[in-house]
Amino acid sequence: MKVGILNITGYSGIELARILNRHPEFEITSVTGRSAAGQNLADIFPHLSGLNLVVKDQLDDGLDIVFSALPHAASAEKLIPFIKNGKFIVDFSADFRLNDSKEYEYWYKTEHPIPEHLKSASYGLPELNRTKIANSKIVANPGCYSTASILALAPAVASSFITEDVIIDAKSGVSGAGRGLSLNTHFSEVNESIKAYSISGHRHMPEVVQEINKLNNELQIKLTFLAHLIPITRGILVSVYAPINPVYINEKSTSVEFIHNMYQEYYRDEQFVFISDQPPTTKQTLGNNRCIIYPTIDTRTNRLIVIACIDNLVKGAAGQAVQNANILFGIPEEVGLEDLALYP
């Protein structure tokens, strides 16, 4: 299949190219970059020299699938002709994640360029939405925080094991902010420092609520979400806290073994979700498409605690995009994504 990438020059686009380079079914034939048109990709990113591609202003014709790594609003606008031509789309931006255009406008402070396509797009979290993805033309790749948060919460919400009051404490490496120059991500500003940000509400929060609430009509979560920037390049770690539903509070269901088995059973058939016996580290997911989850219980307070780790550029972006593309074309989901984590 012939692949086009819009905005290959961002971190997610670069990572997508690295992963697709070893994919046996996909061939990158055309790429764009907003400030790099006319340049050879190898001159910009020497580690991608094996691709032998020239960055262009526009994608070539004859593509089977288009991945867009453009920012919100700009992505949907650029995808319009490909959507009209019936191409398969995997969009990294937020443009097709939220079902309600008013919700999108509230969080992203702009009108949606093509709101009529929101209902037909699928939310690209395969572990929860595989069937709809397989029957879609437009797949909205989830946000990185959202991926880890939803996977951490899903088993507990689906079973009504928790009540609606949920807190997520989330931490991300600096690459999540993209390649754009900013004082906030300057080495001297972030090194040896941790900062909370988007205190009034992070943009990934509404998609977490939207997708989690679909799992249980009787439990509509009230989410407090706080994001932190930490001085690492890659990685997301989310810590989820929620009170246990009183009907579950007994000696058996408030045991660590019970909750561990619940999560194991929920993700029994998933290749990229691993339930751990100990709290994971971000380095365990470095460079691979895994989400590692550690569920436990604070028996003193009858509160569920779930810790989840992903690489924000792989399972949180490019790797998940390839997983979604595999589903669209009926390819086994693990193809191109078999790598273990990098260490050290």
Image: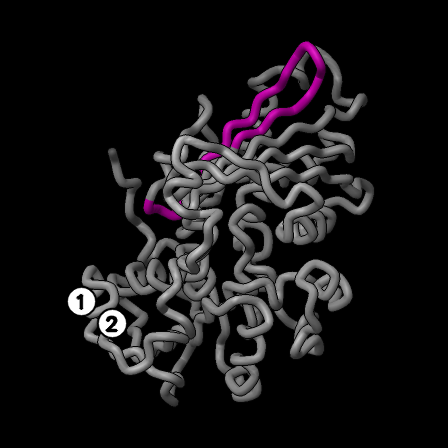
The residue located at (62%, 51%) in the rendering is 204
User: Could you tell me if residue 146 is visible in this image?
Assistant: yes
User: Could you tell me if residue 266 is visible in this image?
Assistant: no
The residue located at (57%, 70%) in the rendering is 135
Residue identified by numbered label 1: 49
Element under disc 1? helix
Three-letter amino acid code at the position of disc 1:
Ser
Numbered circles on residues, count: 2
Of residues 245 and 193, the one drawn nearer to the viewer in this rendering: 193
For marks 1 and 2, the one nearer the N-term is 2
Asked if the stretch drawn in magenta spans residue 30, the answer is no
The residue located at (53%, 79%) in the rendering is 79
Residue identified by numbered label 2: 41
Three-letter amino acid code at the position of disc 2:
Leu
Question: x and y percent of residue 263 in the render?
Answer: 56, 32
Q: Up-down: is 163 above or below 149?
A: above
Question: x and y percent of residue 238 in the render?
Answer: 54, 35
Q: Up-down: is 62 above or below 268?
A: below
Q: Quadrant of residue 284?
A: top left
The Cα–Cα distance between marks 1 and 2, rounded to whole angstroms, is: 7 Å
Q: Are marks 1 and 2 in contact (CB under 8 Å)?
A: yes
Magenta residues span: 287-307
Magenta-highlighted stretch: main secondary structure? strand
